[in-house]
Image (cartoon, rainbow, N blue to C red):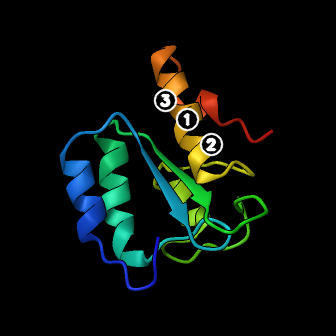
């Protein structure tokens, strides 16, 4: 995520049918509300969406904010919160999980 980012880039990525998508969200793993429908469409198309925090230290939230684009809303739409794993590590973990035949939810247990 970057300030002023619109939904066009994410929509273009999802249209290519990737194996999965990792989003480096703001703060505790938040995105602009304009991206929520694209995320939900990706998940419904069986494209796993994992959300990390682009902040240098600290995990994604899991039950703090419920506004559109915040973690409660994203999880309700099917996105997976990565916890304390950075975007780079989440992409690597997801690639290995897919190669091993695991689903994204198994690759990011938050317990």
N-terminal of the two: label 2 or label 3? 2
Vertical side of 51 occupied by 61: above or below: below
Vertical side of 95 occupied by 43: above or below: below
Q: Residues within 10 Å of mark 2 (few under 14, many from 20)?
A: few
Q: Residues within 10 Å of mark 1 (few under 14, many from 20)?
A: few
Measured as percent of width and height from the top left, residue 6 is found at 31, 77
Measured as percent of width and height from the top left, residue 1 is found at 47, 70
- Residue farthest to the bottom? 4
Displayed quadrant of residue 72? bottom right
Q: Which residue is mark 1?
A: 92
Q: Residue at x 44, y 77 (%)?
A: 32
Q: Are marks 3 and 1 in contact (CB under 8 Å)?
A: yes
Q: Is residue 70 left or right of residue 15?
A: right
- Report the label total: 3
Which structural element holds mark 2?
helix
Measured as percent of width and height from the top left, residue 54 is found at 61, 65
Q: Which residue is mark 3?
A: 95
On residue 89, the disc is: 2
Q: Is residue 15 left or right of residue 64?
A: left
Q: Residue at x 53, y 61 (%)?
A: 24
Measured as percent of width and height from the top left, residue 11 is found at 24, 60
Residue closest to the eye, 27 or 92: 92
Alpha-carbon span between mark 2 and mark 3: 10 Å
Q: Is residue 105 left or right of residue 14?
A: right
- Residue farthest to the top? 100
Vertical side of 48 occupied by 103: above or below: above
Which structural element holds mark 3?
helix
Q: Are marks 2 and 1 in contact (CB under 8 Å)?
A: yes
Displayed quadrant of residue 111? top right
Residue closest to the eye, 37 or 11: 11
């Amino acid at each position: 995520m970057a300030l002023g980012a619109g939904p066009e880039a994410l929509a273009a990525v999802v249209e290519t049918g990737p194996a999965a998508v990792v989003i480096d969200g703001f703060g505790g793993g938040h995105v602009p509300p304009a991206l929520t429908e694209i995320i939900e469409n990706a998940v419904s198309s069986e494209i796993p969406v994992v959300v990390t925090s682009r902040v240098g230290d600290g995990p994604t939230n899991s039950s703090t904010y419920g506004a559109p684009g915040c973690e409660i809303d994203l999880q309700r739409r099917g996105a997976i919160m990565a916890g304390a794993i950075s975007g780079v590590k989440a992409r690597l973990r997801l690639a290995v999980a897919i190669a091993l035949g695991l689903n994204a939810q198994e690759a990011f247990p938050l317990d």
